Structures are given as C-alpha cells and as structure tokens.
Amino acid sequence: MRARLFVVAILIAAQASAGCALAGAPILAGATIGAVADIGREQTTQRCEIEATPVGTRVHIRLRGGQTMDGRYQGEIFSAEEYVVRYAAASGLPALQADIAVRLTSQRILNGRLVGFEPHRLILLGYDGRVSVVALGEVLEVSELSERAEPVAVSGPFLIERELEGRLPYRSCVRVSATTFPLEAIEAVEVPYDKHAGIKTGVVIGLVVDALAIAALATLFRFQD
C-alpha cells in the first residue's frame, strides 16, 4: 500500500511540474517532449503530442535514429498488411492474433486474441467480439495460450521497457507530407508556437512526466514481485 502511495505521489509531483493533467490528456511515449522553454528570446516552436496535432499543420519530426523531416502532418493511418510485417520483425513478443491471457494488477484475467499495441495500451479482441483496450501499467503478464513447446509469456514491465526503447510496434503510422513513419519511430514532434493562443492544456506534456510515470509503474511492479 505504501509503495502505491509513493508512486501516486511521484506522479502528482510530476504533473504539477509539467503544468498539465496526466489523466486529462493521453501520454504518447516517444512522441511527446513538452514545451520548449527558451528563456531570453522569443519562443517559435513547441513540442507536442502527434495525436493532438491538427491535420495540415506544419511539423518538424525527429526520429529515434536521429533523422529529421519537415512537412505537413497528414494524420495517422493503419495498414493491416504493413503491421503484420513490422510486428513480425519485433522478436520476443506474443504472436499477433495469438490467443492470449492478460493478467492484470487487480488479478483479473482477460482472454482473447492479441490485436496489437498503441501508445501505453494493449488491444485485445475478446471471444465475444468485444475489443478491450488495456493500459500497459495495469498488466502483470501476457501469455500465449498455445500448445506449442515454448509459448511466449512477457511481463508488463517488459512491455513498458520495450515501449521506452521504441521497440514496441504500434498499429498506427504517421504520415507527414508524402512520407509515412511508424508511430514508435518518432522521438519528438515540433510545431509552430502561437504566442497569442499559448500552449493548450492537454496538448503539451513533458517527456519527464512520461518517463517518470512509466518508470514509477515499472518500479511498483518489481516491488510487488
């Protein structure tokens, strides 16, 4: 119980320092960095969540490999065929469309087929046809329900670490001008700063909050183990 309170305290402190509500805006790991605080000269850009960026906005993209690109944000796209190929290249994960059991921190178990991942979330298709979106922070373990010799089983902290490293394949891709990037490949998104409108609550969120939240949850899981 004390460990949980400690984690909550960390998250509240991080939220206060970032100036936005963690629960009020989705956190996009790897694609959020926070406002550019440029003291001493006029601020011209801000870093934001790609999900909150209006289509048509001029953006500056920085990828995890160090490459950069400028262009117009054209929105997120999904291709089942492309995702199958990209997911297959990520080793150590339960197979896509595999029957899995997801054990939660509440000890509840969800069964269904693995549809894939999105930022901080696992997507599960239940046998009743319902789609469940499960926060990675609530996952203790994901295990394949397979008769093969070595079915894959991974922990929630393992998935969180893979996400921090940019090695958890998301279903969504981002299109900028004529180029498409996997969402997990993006390290930062920069957009023009509107000094009259200011920074909208819920749009800009610090990477420090992102990292603290995930690290704190991972620490809690290890503590519980």
Image (cartoon, rainbow, N blue to C red):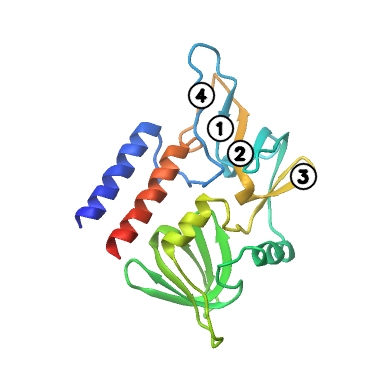
Residue 52: image location, x then y, percent: 57, 41
The residue that appears at 54% across and 19% down in the rendered structure is 196
> Residue at label 3?
179
The residue that appears at 41% across and 40% down in the rendered structure is 209
Measure the alpha-carbon separation of dots 1 and 2: 10 Å
The residue that appears at 35% across and 73% down in the rendered structure is 108
Q: Is residue 161 above or below residue 14?
A: below
Whether the residues at callouts 1 and 2 have beta carbons within 8 Å, the answer is: no
Q: Give the mark, 2 or 4, whose residue is nearer the N terminus.
A: 2
Q: Nearer the viewer, mark 3 or mark 2?
A: 3
Give me the disc on residue 53. Answer: 2
Type of residue at label 1?
Arg
Type of residue at label 2?
Thr
- What secondary structure is found at the residue carrying circle 1? strand
Residue 202: image location, x then y, percent: 47, 38
- What secondary structure is found at the residue carrying circle 4? loop
Give me the disc on residue 198. Answer: 4
- What secondary structure is found at the residue carrying circle 3? strand
Give me the disc on residue 47. Answer: 1
Which sits in the foreground, 222 or 83? 222
Which sits in the foreground, 168 or 122? 168
Horizontal side of residue 16 vs 157, given as left or right: left
Whether the residues at callouts 3 and 2 have beta carbons within 8 Å, the answer is: no
Q: Give the mark, 1 or 3, whose residue is nearer the N terminus.
A: 1
